[in-house]
Amino acid sequence: MRTTWRLALTTIALATAYYLLGAFVFGRLPWVSIPSWWSVAWPSKHAAVIAWFDALNIIGSFAAAFPIAVVVTVFVRQYKYWVSLIAAGGIATFGIVSSYVDYPPVVSGTGAVDWWLDSSIQFVALCTAPALLVWLCHRLPPNYRWSGP
């Protein structure tokens, strides 16, 4: 029973940290300015904007998830992937629902499709980034060469 409470509190703490790190990282990404080289690489300006937002969502998700994945890898002994998925899934759900309330999608036209596409990509990126980075931390070879100062 003690492990269950510790695991639950760890998951809540990691979810809170992931939310705060995400707010910090996403607030500093260049949402307003799209680089000229990015715009040239896409067939239309509309496609370039959508792809830019999706790329920033993925980059921000991985940047915010990196410290969480390191903490999970080092401190959580059991259920590492479940802890990271539950913490990230709660935050991703909260983020999508709050963005739906703040910015409701357009009822018809391409605006609804764009909103659905961006929300889906953001949800998947936010949910899977910590678990993927935990998996990557386990797959990296250990470095025992450093002997200290």
Image (cartoon, rainbow, N blue to C red):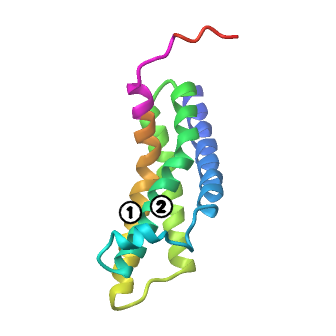
Q: 118 and 97: which one is in front?
A: 118
Numbered badge on residue 121: 1
Task: Tell me if residue 47 is in the magenta stretch.
Answer: no
Query: Which percent across, then down, holds residue 122?
Result: 44, 62
Question: How many numbered callouts?
Answer: 2
Q: CA distance from mark 2 to mark 1?
A: 8 Å
Q: Secondary structure at mark 2?
A: helix
Q: Nearer the viewer, mark 2 or mark 1?
A: 2
Q: 50 and 100: which one is in front?
A: 50
Q: 76 and 18: which one is in front?
A: 18
The answer to whether the residue labelled 2 contacts the one labelled 1, judged by CB atoms less than 8 Å apart, is yes
Query: Which percent across, then down, holds residue 82?
Result: 43, 39
Q: Is residue 18 visible?
A: yes
The residue beneath circle 2 is 57
Image quarter (top left, top right, bottom left or bottom right) of the N terminus: top right
Q: Is residue 118 visible?
A: no
Looking at the image, residue 4 sits to the left or right of residue 118; the answer is right
Image quarter (top left, top right, bottom left or bottom right) of the C terminus: top right
Query: Which percent across, then down, holds residue 92?
Result: 49, 58
Q: 5 and 36: which one is in front?
A: 36
Q: Residue at x 48, y 54 (%)?
A: 59
Q: Which residues are magenta?
A: 135-144
Query: Which percent across, then down, holds residue 129?
Result: 44, 47
Residue at far top of view: 147
Q: Secondary structure at mark 1?
A: helix
Given the image, on which type of amino acid does mark 2 rest?
Asn
Q: Residues within 10 Å of mark 1 (few under 14, many from 20)?
A: some
Displayed quadrant of residue 47 = bottom left
Q: Is residue 35 above or below residue 149?
A: below
